[in-house]
Amino acid sequence: MRTGRVRTAVAALALLAAGCSVELPGQQEPPRLFTLTPKTTFDPNLPRADWQLAIDAPLSEAGLNTTRIALRHSPVTLEYYARAEWVDRAPQLVQRMLVESFESTGKIVAVARQSINLRSDFNLISELREFQAEYDQGGAPKVRVRINAKLVKMPERMIIGSTTAEFIEKSDGTGLEAVVHAFDAALGKSLKRIVEWTLTTAGQRS
C-alpha cells in the first residue's frame, strides 16, 4: 500500500514538472465584463407623450440570448469571444438601453420594463435578430445590429405599426474594446430610430 502511494505522488510531481495544463477550480481568469450606453441625443421636435409605455425584453434566437459576445466568420457559424461577456444577457441589456433611451428624450410621461407589470397604454415588443461582430477578409470586423419592433395598443392588443432598425459599424481596430465601441455605435443608431419611430407612431394613435 505504501509503495502505491509513493508511485502516485511521483506521478503527480511528474505531471507538474511537465507543465500539465489542468486548471483547478478558482484558477481560471474571470471574464472581462462590458456594457453599452443608451442613446441621449434626439430630435428636439419629437412629440411629447402623455401616455405610458411598457417595453418587453426582445426575443432572440438561443445563440444571442446569452451574456457571451457573439461573432461570425461565416453566415452559418456563430462563435463567441473568449473570456469576455456582457454584463447581462443581450436581450435584457438591449431592453434596459431602450428604457433609458426613452427616458433621455424627456418626452414621455412613463416608460418601464414590462416585468414590473406597468399598466401601459402601449407595449413595445421586439426581436433581436442580429447582434454580432462579423469577420470576412481579416483585419478589423464590422458589427451588425438588427432589431425588429412592433408597437401594440393596449388594452386592445392591436399592432399599430412595425419597423426594423439595422445598422453596421466598422470597428476601429481588432482589439476587443474597439469592437465593443462598434457595438455601442450600431446599437445607439438602432435605439434612436426605434425611440423616435415609437413616439411619432403612438402619438398619432393616442
Image: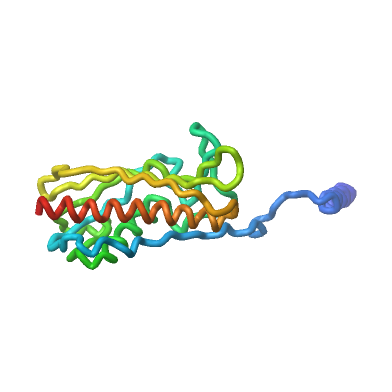
Quick one: which residue is furthest to the right in this view?
A: 3
Q: Is residue 1 visible?
A: no
Residue 135 on image: x %, y %: 55, 41
Residue 168 on image: x %, y %: 43, 46
At 29% from the left edge and 46% from the top edge, which residue is drawn? 126
Q: Is residue 201 visible?
A: yes
In this picture, residue 124 sits left or right of residue 143: left
At 35% from the left edge and 61% from the top edge, which residue is drawn? 39
At 37% from the left edge and 56% from the top edge, which residue is drawn? 188
Q: How is the image coloured?
A: rainbow
At 20% from the left edge and 60% from the top edge, which residue is drawn? 46
In the figure, residue 40 lies in which quadrant?
bottom left
In this picture, residue 8 sits left or right of residue 118: right
In this picture, residue 164 sits left or right of residue 14: left
When the figure is inspected, residue 79 is found, relative to residue 200, above or below; the finding is above
Quick one: which residue is furthest to the top in this view?
A: 76
Of residue 30 and residue 48, the one placed in the foreground of this image is 48
Q: Quadrant of the C terminus?
A: bottom left
In the figure, residue 51 lies in which quadrant?
bottom left
Residue 12 on image: x %, y %: 82, 51
Residue 145 on image: x %, y %: 40, 46
Of residue 77 and residue 45, the one placed in the foreground of this image is 45
Of residue 61 and residue 99, the one placed in the foreground of this image is 99
Of residue 86 and residue 192, the one placed in the foreground of this image is 192
In this picture, residue 54 sits left or right of residue 5: left
